[in-house]
Image (tube, rainbow, N blue to C red):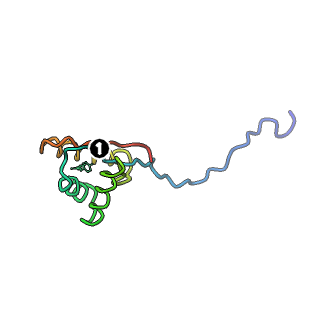
Amino acid sequence: AKPFENDVALKPEVAKPKLPPMFNVLLLNDDYTPMEFVVECIERFFNKSREQATQIMLKVHTEGLAVCGVYPQDIAETKMNQVLSYARDQQHPLQCVTEPA
Ligand code: TYC
């Protein structure tokens, strides 16, 4: 046999940093949820200051939606579900969704 004919070119293994895919959590505007309730949700579930939360709420109010935070998928979905169940408990129609960042 010729030398090297069975040799397989192996790619050198390189340690890649493993970053999880990230997901945006967005709030959607509606005509009924009180502004104060939305600000409280953003403070509580997305760990924002009152000033940051107010700015995000106003962006949702004027533009229809805004990103409240960016997280790995399982955390993003947990936050979305926390917002949805808190809003439902208080009888507000506030909607929250996730999407790939
Ligand atoms: N548009 C609502 C109002 O005028 C306020 C609001 C803001 C509702 C953000 C939902 O995600 C929302 N009371």
Q: Position of residue 7 (x, y in %)?
A: 76, 39
Q: Is residue 23 above or below residue 54?
A: above
Q: Position of residue 43 (x, y in %)?
A: 24, 59
Between 44 and 6, the one nearer to me in the picture: 44
Q: Is residue 35 above or below residue 74?
A: below
- Residue of label 1: 96
Identify which amino acid the numbered label 1 is placed on. Answer: Cys
Q: Is residue 94 left or right of residue 1?
A: left
Q: Is residue 16 left or right of residue 28?
A: right
Q: Dot 1: few (<14), some (14–19), or many (≥20) neighbours within 10 Å?
A: many
Residue located 43% across and 49% down the image = 22
Quarter of the figure with the N terminus = top right
Between 29 and 15, the one nearer to me in the picture: 29
Q: Is residue 54 above or below residue 85?
A: below
Q: Position of residue 27 (x, y in %)?
A: 30, 47
Between 30 and 43, the one nearer to me in the picture: 30
Residue located 57% across and 54% down the image = 15
